[in-house]
Amino acid sequence: MTRFLNPVLLGKHDRPAPDYGIFPSLVRFPAKLTADDYRLAAHGSNEDPIPKPLTAHVHVPARLGHEVNGAARYLSYLKHEIALQGSLFDVDRCIEQLVLTGNGAGCLGDDQLAGLMTELRRHFGLKRSRDRDFSLRTGPNRLSPQRLADLIALGFNRFNIDIRDSGAAAIERLVEIQAASRQAYLHPPTLELALRLPGRTPAGFSALLEHLVCLRPERITLSRDVGHCTADWPRGSGGSVPGDQGGTPERSETLALLVQGIECLVAEGYVHTGMGRLVLSSDTLVAAQRRGWSQRCLEDYHLHGDADCIGFGVGAISHVADGYYQNGRKLPDYYARLDAGELAICRGYELNADDRVRRDVIQRLMGSGDVPYTAIEKRHRIVFRNYFAPELLALQEMAGDGLVDIRRDRIALTPPGRLLPNRLAMVFDGAFSESKPRYLQMV
């Protein structure tokens, strides 16, 4: 197997950095932008000669208060917010991408999901064609061929599945789900593998990868931690959690697992598109990345970069025109704003000219991994080498370590650099401070 990833080198550069699903990062959001600013931005976007399509992110956190009916209460507020937001956007602007985010999204029942989708259809146009991208994250224990058919009937056509169990029963369930997906002419589910599971070993991980390669899923994501739907995995028979048998891998061990996974999958014909994402060469993301169309959003890589994004739910983020707007981040605040008949927005940020230049560069690094100077210069009327002279100098160490090529006419990430695009993008974040907490490391 060809080794093109050096764990020591990656460990050196794997330092906390924003994930750049949005730019600028949330720590720069002041409280001065209000719901009124958002209304004006939405109205202005409707007046564009060719209004942008819409994407929607619906956030469902894992903890919804101490009430027995916490989920039902939260969904009722979500529906109220959907109605308020729906009144701001013209009806001919379809939602092309719908993502249910948060650790609680995959644990909603079918009746709850049906109610949510009904409310979205009541107030927005939802794209019906096959190229829509309506996704849900769940675990294999909550996804059978019959439930898959029910979710398809609701409109979902992409599924992300948490894989934690490499036992025969779990693999058999995945085979059934894959077969049902293909029979329904769906994209096979994206499989998500957490690396820092207790009991995760190189030998066990190798066996799991061998099983998954035989299934040939279109997309596989390797992530550091378990992040989704813990309630999806009961202890005991039928749904064992590997964490019950051993300690959590150390950072060096986790980094070795990451390198092992990427190199194994690349050897089997997968393309490493960035961070922990690997896809088959036939996947639309590969062609989009080569053409510079792929972008990283709040949750993942996607092909809907030229769209206005509406965020629903506690802490959700909307992006309309050059503004970012965040809902109240705590449930009492979120509920109180909606009870007052207001949008739940509590703060936001409007990009200035410098932000727009830096966002363009960062999005290209995070998406295609290629930044042609002329594209930036024509769009923003700058001379790239002059505007970013300090940044190009700061990249020299990473260029010397083989993470990035600094060429006469462009910056291009190398294969190792694609694992840490946010670390390189951070160089172009003019307001970044390494003292800020809560930033992402791959490992």
Image (tube, grey):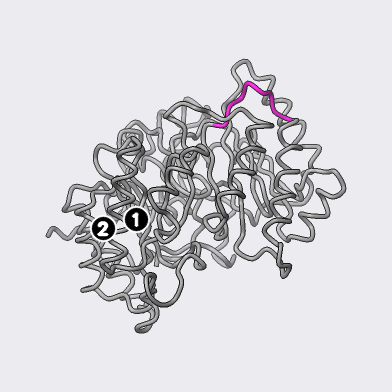
Question: Badge 2: few (under 14), some or many (20 or more) residues near its Cα, within 10 Å?
Answer: many
Name the one closer to the observer, 28 or 104.
104
Q: Position of residue 240 (x, y in %)?
A: 38, 74
Q: Which residue is mark 1?
A: 419
- Identity of the residue furthest to the left in this view: 1
> In the image, 23: left or right of 345?
left
Element under label 1? helix
Element under label 2? helix
Q: Amino acid at mark 1?
A: Leu
Name the one closer to the observer, 147 or 267.
147
Q: Amino acid at mark 2?
A: Ile
Name the one closer to the observer, 184 or 96.
184
User: Can residue 246 be seen by looking at this rendering?
Assistant: yes
Q: Position of residue 52 (x, y in %)?
A: 58, 25
Q: Quadrant of the C terminus?
A: bottom left
Q: Which residue is mark 2?
A: 262
